[in-house]
């Protein structure tokens, strides 16, 4: 009877509060916090199921899958050849990726990723609970776990960003914090062990989390532990308290506190040393790599460093969405945090919130210094939303049945309380669901690409012997990379970039170069122009924007794969050598990289699991012991240690420990005794009651703080109505300003509609009395093709309303269009009329140049080289193909606009068409090479038999290295990076080679009515008409202008792209400005030309009959015009 | 106390397990060698053998009966070892045919106990049985004697050994006009080569090789007309009204080289038109030796002068009259 009573009392009282999965009140043997159980179930159901559908559209998921694929293929190999011409895997902590690799053996990479991500979410959920237990009540901790499941920041991190390592390591970190707290407070070695293994696992997943977690998570926990130690009287401490603080009793009072806090401080120090050691040891190869090969790259711009006021989208993605409905509870969190023991964590929260504002204020940059440009600051916002969870748990508790609930019930009634609770709950969940589907509303990535056809293409005919590149793939480039062993010059992990063309520019990926302005296009152009340098032969394009750049750089379309991806190929590229270079590291580092991080993860999981299981079983055993003591047997005989180690050995080991123990504890006992003696108050100082030694608290209490009453229901309602009114007014003003109230606004909106292909909206802005039918309007638009209409992106629209009346206006519109080749300004005049209170645009008259109404027959010549599609393409030059005989007719080194160029002419003397590669090299007086480059867009790369082409090689340095000195950071496709010539140029040579080709050999355009004219500014111009006598639209015509001096030699070569296309059997007028001779400085008259033909009878004079005489004031003798045309539709 | 004892138990158990793992790497000691025979040893073998033949080797010496004879044959692709026993002062060994397939010099070393003797053996290639398809480059050349290509043939015996230098080989050429030619060549380093010219007829030249009973497959070489002779132009119709709409066809006469071979299809030709409104440049390609372009009638009446050029070779000029709309020119088809 007594036993039963004792057991019941014990059960009611409950065990000491454990920061495990145990609630403070044990009503059943192993009961777990119900909110936590619910949170885990929801996390599993919600995030795991959703991840299968969302991870493919995230930013980073495929990158981690790529890394995992590497480990699945070669666990201990530190080198991967597939990106950036090879990079080391020790450049990123491998924990989460190796976990995927292990799982991939059973379920594949994609499912492995989802499972690992789910594991991370579950760890974070449990961790949020444990972390909250440190700062808040048990109930609040349960709510914190639930809040974590539907946190919009966690949802965004998982389902939008795909940041697996961040979540993976955070889970371990949060689970580690209670052990840190208990080690510092209680000093039991097992807590130190668990804290360290948790830190090791955190580091294995993501070293940055350990690094910053030590500041923003671990430090507040240690401060809390130290403060609690400071306040808790030490056992054996003198009980006397001074009545007042005097100089005489100040030292004993202080020493008393020192004695209280010293053990905790030492333990914190011991822990800190171990933490640093583990941070270094677990990912030691990473640190060694960082030291040996430091990241000297130009930092990548990140919108989290922008001002969120100027860049609203950045503010939305990196601030508003992560915080979400947390913002409602944030004031409460700060209030609650600063007025309770959670103040250290609240200070950390404040700092994180502050740093997470990015470049909105200058202060984060001032605080972080150079690190500001390297860090992604959204990480701080993410951590802020984690640190606030315990206080939000308190907010929920208060709103459910605490002070907030009482206030709302008293002021607004019970129904309103339920409405507020329900609406907040629903809003929180809806916000999370909306965030998870953010990638559906805002497309961050191109549509999903089936990479299988690309993988098959790379595998067949040994196409993997060359490097490849993708354009317009987004982060799916990583998924492609993980599915093939073929190598690429590009990649999706910018820290591993090695080529100077990439590291010297802030270009994250070449495949999205158009989003990176000059550096992006500049880098890409170099790879396009000199692909042989990188063994780059294939480009998979998912973005037509780059088509003109590719074509005019000598690439041709090989085939369109069944997934819609266009394959571009560059002919005559040498294959990769059999053995590729790699940077070796010592074997011990490779072994460490393969074993230590994964070992740390396994040990941490086993240890934490064992700890949790032990406590659960202990609780059950305790309950059993108290209710059924006769069932408890001797458990110790069954342990593994007992089985392996005999009793005599265990006894001797323990005896050895006893021998050593005094030597360890002796000095400490001496110091503690000394402090204890110094803690004694002077006689007569005992005042009987404790007096706070924090004298400033006494002063603060004297200040008359205003204590306003809580707002009444009426005040709250008034504030809500006022807020709604203010927001509505602001929105109305904004709408009014954006509305079509002026001709300028209408025209700008019209051009914007055209740019984004919103043709119905553009049509609606046309004059209803003058516009054609909508179908006819679309037909008229379809006739306007070409570089600007089909490949241009609107950059700027300037409207000048010249003439206006009450109902009519005339406006001059200057629109600036960006293409991959150059920037085009277009000038148009629009008539406008006021119709029903809105300005409308008079549509352009329909195009008058229509093709002759006759059926056109046109014979064509087609070629086929056995290499194409036969499966025989096994080498740089297929065995059945040939090198056409080409001859360099002339070459000359010139300088134009401060840029070195080699200009000249060459001819195809063969019976077969050829695909040209022309390389020029500059030498100094000692015949040392200064620079080399290929002819890019100022040449016709594909030559028919007996065809002549001019060429111009414009020398460039490594893209981006001189950007800050020479160029503005805005987009300008024609910008270049000058070469860094250390010596004067003494000589130069030209190498020309060709292989037989069958592609892009149409010559459908004719030049009509060529004449030299003067433009409005008095400059000489070539005017004429392009006529397409073929059966295919000439999408982008390029005029190649070869200027000859009086000696008949090439003096300069110009390339002019015509902005509009020329449809078949139609004509198009053009006028292009000529370059005066005085703008071109001749440096060397003739260089050596190397090609496979040198026929004495073939000279520059063979094209004399095709030349136009030029006016003498231009400084030239004559001009030859040739055409190079991109047919986009083929 | 109980808890501390458990910790020591576990640590000791771990230590014992590691020790057991380390012990598995130990091995037992080896045996001592017996004394070796050391006398005079002789080896005899033919100095020359054909690839794929069995070679007999005789080893003689005063070694006791039953002593083990080791014959090591060191070839270019690695050593082979054969063993026999001495019987009455001699041991006969045979190098099997499978081990003599690679031609080249071999060293034969016989050993009995500590005694050694050596000799050399030269394995030569057998008769030529395989000829590669002639490698021709460039694959296309111009008609005439000025342009050259090169044909190279690789010969080998049945075991892929290069034949001895000077082995005879015949290169057979079949020209587009049906004529045949044979070039007698000698191999060097397993290869034979000869320059080729295009002669007078454009087309495809088949190139093959024979040696003994071996035949190669044929390779093709393209011979094309390269340098055109002067040609003429005509317009169809010869004139048009200047309406800016109708189209006229300009056509060349068949363009051939000096041997009457038409220029290959796809050769670029440029029509130069001097019209009252300005100069015109119209590119075209030959098909069957003829090139044609269309010319849109101008809107203003006048006379246009037309020429066509292929890399410096120019046609005779052609005059075309575009009449006013009032007096339509007659159509000639």
Image: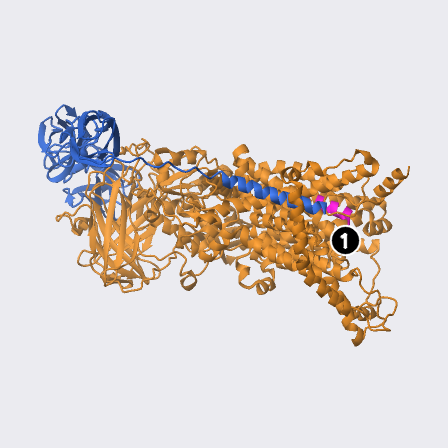
Which residue is situated farthest in the bottom direction here?
A247
State the quadrant of the C terminus of chain A.
top left
Residue lying furthest right: A1
Chain painted in blue in the figure = B
Q: Magenta stretch?
A: A136-148
Instruction: Give me the chain letter of mark 1.
Output: A
Q: On the rendered structure, is A1007 left or right of A823? A: left
Q: Which of B7 and A108 is in front in this view?
A: B7
Secondary structure type for disc 1:
helix
Identify the image quadrant of residue A254.
bottom right
The one of A1100 and A443 positioned closer to us in this rendering: A443
In-front residue for pair A421/A1070: A421
Visible in this render: residue A791? yes
Q: Residues within 10 Å of mark 1 (few under 14, many from 20)?
A: few
Residue A107 x/y as whole percent: 55, 33
Q: Is residue A1031 above or below residue A504?
A: above
In the displayed structure, B256 sits above or below A807; it is above
Image quadrant in which you'd find residue A786: top left
Check disc 1 and report the residue beneath it.
Answer: A721
State the residue at coordinates (37%, 49%).
Answer: A527
The percent coordinates of residue B199 (x first, y second) are 10, 34
Q: Which residue is drawn at 90% across and 39% down?
A: A2
Q: Dominant secondary structure of the magenta stretch?
A: helix
Residue A140 sits inside the magenta stretch: yes
Image-based side of A671 in relation to A1093, left or right: right
Chain A palette colour: orange
């Amino acid at each position: 009877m007594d036993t039963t009573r004792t057991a019941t009392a014990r059960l009611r009282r409950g065990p000491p509060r454990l920061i495990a999965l145990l609630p403070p009140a044990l009503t059943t043997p192993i009961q777990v916090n119900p909110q936590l159980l619910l949170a885990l179930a929801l996390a599993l159901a919600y995030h795991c199921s959703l991840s299968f559908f969302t991870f493919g559209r995230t930013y980073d998921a495929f990158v981690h899958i790529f890394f995992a694929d590497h480990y699945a293929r070669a666990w201990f190999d530190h080198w991967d050849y597939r990106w950036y011409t090879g990079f080391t895997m020790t450049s990123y902590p491998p924990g989460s990726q190796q976990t995927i690799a292990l799982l991939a053996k059973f379920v594949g990479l994609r499912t492995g990723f989802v499972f690992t991500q789910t594991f991370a979410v579950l760890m974070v959920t449990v961790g949020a609970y444990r972390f909250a237990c440190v700062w808040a009540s048990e109930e609040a901790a349960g709510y914190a776990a639930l809040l974590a499941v539907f946190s919009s920041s966690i949802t965004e991190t998982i389902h939008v960003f795909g940041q697996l390592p961040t979540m993976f390591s955070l889970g371990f970190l949060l689970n580690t914090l209670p052990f840190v707290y208990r080690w510092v407070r209680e000093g039991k070695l097992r807590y130190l062990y668990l804290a360290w293994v948790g830190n090791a696992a955190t580091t294995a997943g993501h070293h940055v989390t350990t690094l910053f977690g030590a500041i923003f998570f671990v430090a507040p926990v240690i401060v809390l532990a130290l403060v609690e130690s400071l306040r808790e009287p030490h056992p054996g401490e003198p009980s006397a308290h001074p009545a007042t603080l005097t100089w005489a009793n100040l030292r004993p009072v202080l020493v008393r506190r020192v004695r209280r806090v010293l053990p905790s401080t030492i333990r914190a120090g011991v822990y800190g040393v171990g933490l640093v050691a583990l941070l270094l040891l677990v990912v030691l190869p990473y640190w060694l790599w960082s030291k040996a090969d430091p990241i000297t790259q130009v930092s990548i711009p990140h919108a989290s460093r922008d001002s969120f006021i100027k860049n609203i989208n950045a503010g939305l993605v990196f601030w508003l969405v992560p915080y979400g409905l947390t913002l409602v509870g944030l004031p409460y969190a700060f209030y609650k945090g600063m007025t309770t023991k959670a103040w250290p964590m609240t200070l950390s929260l404040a700092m994180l919130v502050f740093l997470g504002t990015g470049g909105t204020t200058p202060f984060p940059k001032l605080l972080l210094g150079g690190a500001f440009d390297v860090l992604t600051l959204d990480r701080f916002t993410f951590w802020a939303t984690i640190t606030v969870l315990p206080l939000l748990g308190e907010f929920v508790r208060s709103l459910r049945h605490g002070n907030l609930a009482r206030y709302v019930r008293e002021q607004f009634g019970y129904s309103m309380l339920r409405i507020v609770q329900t609406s907040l709950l629903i809003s929180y969940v809806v916000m999370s669901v909306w965030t998870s589907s953010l990638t559906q509303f805002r497309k961050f990535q191109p549509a999903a690409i089936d990479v299988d056809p690309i993988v098959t293409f790379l595998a067949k005919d040994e196409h993997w012997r060359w490097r490849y590149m993708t354009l317009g793939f987004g982060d799916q480039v990583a998924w492609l990379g993980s599915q093939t062993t073929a190598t690429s010059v590009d990649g999706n992990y910018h820290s591993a970039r090695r080529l100077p063309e990439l590291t010297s520019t802030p270009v994250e990926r070449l495949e999205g170069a158009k989003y990176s302005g000059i550096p992006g296009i500049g880098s890409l152009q170099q790879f396009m122009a000199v692909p042989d340098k990188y063994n780059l032969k294939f480009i998979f394009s998912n973005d037509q924007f780059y088509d003109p750049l590719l074509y005019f750089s000598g690439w041709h379309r090989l085939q369109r794969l069944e997934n819609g991806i266009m394959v571009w190929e560059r002919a005559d590229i040498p294959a990769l050598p059999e053995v590729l270079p790699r940077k070796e590291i010592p074997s011990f580092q490779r072994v460490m990289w393969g074993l230590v991080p994964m070992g740390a993860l396994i040990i941490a999981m086993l240890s934490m699991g064992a700890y949790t299981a032990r406590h659960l079983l202990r609780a059950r055993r305790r309950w059993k012991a108290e209710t059924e003591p006769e069932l408890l047997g001797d458990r110790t005989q069954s342990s593994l240690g007992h089985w392996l180690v005999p009793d005599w050995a265990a006894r001797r080991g323990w005896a050895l420990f006893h021998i050593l123990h005094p030597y360890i504890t002796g000095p400490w006992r001496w110091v503690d005794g000394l402090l204890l003696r110094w803690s004694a108050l002077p006689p007569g100082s005992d005042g009987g009651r404790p007096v706070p030694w924090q004298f400033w608290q006494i002063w603060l209490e004297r200040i008359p703080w205003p204590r306003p009453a809580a707002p009444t229901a009426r005040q709250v309602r008034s504030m809500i109505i006022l807020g709604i009114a203010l927001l509505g007014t602001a929105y109305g003003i904004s709408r009014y300003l954006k509305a079509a109230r002026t001709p300028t606004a209408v025209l700008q909106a019209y051009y914007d509609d055209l740019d984004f292909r919103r043709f119905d909206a553009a049509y609606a802005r046309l004059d209803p009395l003058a516009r054609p039918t909508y179908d006819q309007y679309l037909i008229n638009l379809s006739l306007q093709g070409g570089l600007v209409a089909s490949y241009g992106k609107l950059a700027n629209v300037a409207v000048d309303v010249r003439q206006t009346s009450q109902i009519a206006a005339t406006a001059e519109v200057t629109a600036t269009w960006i293409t991959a080749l150059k920037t085009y300004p277009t000038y148009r005049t629009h008539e406008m009329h006021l119709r029903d209170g809105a300005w409308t645009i008079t549509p352009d008259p329909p195009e008058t140049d229509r093709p002759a109404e006759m059926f056109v027959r046109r014979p064509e010549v087609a070629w086929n080289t056995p290499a194409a599609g036969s499966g025989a393409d096994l080498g740089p030059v297929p065995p059945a193909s040939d090198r056409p005989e080409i001859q360099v007719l002339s070459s000359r080194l010139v300088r134009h606009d401060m840029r070195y160029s080699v200009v000249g002419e060459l001819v195809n003397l063969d019976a077969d068409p050829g695909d040209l590669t022309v390389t020029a090299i500059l030498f100094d007086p000692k015949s040392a090479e200064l620079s080399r480059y290929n002819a890019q867009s100022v040449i016709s790369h594909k030559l028919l038999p007996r065809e002549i082409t001019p060429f111009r090689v414009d020398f460039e340095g490594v893209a981006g290295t001189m950007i800050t000195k020479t160029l503005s950071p805005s987009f300008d496709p024609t910008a270049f990076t000058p070469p860094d010539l250390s010596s004067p140029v003494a000589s130069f040579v030209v190498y020309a080679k060709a292989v037989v080709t069958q592609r892009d050999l149409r010559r459908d355009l004719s030049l009509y009515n060529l004449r030299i004219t003067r433009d409005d500014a008095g400059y000489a111009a070539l005017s004429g008409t392009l006529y397409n006598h073929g059966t295919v639209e000439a999408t982008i015509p390029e005029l190649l202008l070869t200027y000859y001096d009086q000696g008949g030699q090439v003096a300069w070569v110009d390339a002019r792209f015509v902005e509009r296309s020329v449809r078949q059997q139609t004509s198009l007028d053009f006028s292009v400005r000529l370059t005066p001779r005085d703008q071109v400085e001749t440096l060397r008259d003739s260089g050596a030309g190397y090609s496979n033909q040198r026929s004495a009878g073939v000279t520059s004079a063979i094209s004399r009959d095709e030349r136009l005489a030029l006016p003498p004031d231009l400084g030239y003798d004559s001009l030859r015009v040739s055409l190079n045309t991109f047919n986009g539709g083929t | 106390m109980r808890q501390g004892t458990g910790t020591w138990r576990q640590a000791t158990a771990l230590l014992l397990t590691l020790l057991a793992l380390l012990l598995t790497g130990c091995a037992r000691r080896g045996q001592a060698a017996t004394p070796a025979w050391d006398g005079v040893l002789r080896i005899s073998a033919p100095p020359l053998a054909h690839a794929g033949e069995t070679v007999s080797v005789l080893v003689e010496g005063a070694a006791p009966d039953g002593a083990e004879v080791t014959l090591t044959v060191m070839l270019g692709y690695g050593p082979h070892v054969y063993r026999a026993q001495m019987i009455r002062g001699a041991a006969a060994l045979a190098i099997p045919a499978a081990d003599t397939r690679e031609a080249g010099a071999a060293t034969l070393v016989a050993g009995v106990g500590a005694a050694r003797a050596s000799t050399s053996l030269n394995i030569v290639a057998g008769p030529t049985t395989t000829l590669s398809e002639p490698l021709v480059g460039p694959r296309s050349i111009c008609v005439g004697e000025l342009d050259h290509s090169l044909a190279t043939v690789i010969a080998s015996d049945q075991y892929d050994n290069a034949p001895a230098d000077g082995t005879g080989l015949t290169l057979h050429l079949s020209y587009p006009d049906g004529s045949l030619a044979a070039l007698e060549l000698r191999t060097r380093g397993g290869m034979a080569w000869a320059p080729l010219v295009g002669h007078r007829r454009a087309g495809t030249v088949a190139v093959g090789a024979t040696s003994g009973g071996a035949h190669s497959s044929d390779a093709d070489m393209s011979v094309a007309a390269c340098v055109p002779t002067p040609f003429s132009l005509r317009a169809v119709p010869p004139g048009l009204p200047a309406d800016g709409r109708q189209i006229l066809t300009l056509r060349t006469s068949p363009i051939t080289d000096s041997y009457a071979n038409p220029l290959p299809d796809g050769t670029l030709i440029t029509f130069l038109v001097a019209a009252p409104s300005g100069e015109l440049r119209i590119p075209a390609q030959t098909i069957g030796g003829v090139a044609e372009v269309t010319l849109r009638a101008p809107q203003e009446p006048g006379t246009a002068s037309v020429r066509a050029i292929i890399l410096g070779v120019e046609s005779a000029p052609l005059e075309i009259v575009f009449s006013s709309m009032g007096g339509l020119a007659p159509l000639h088809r």
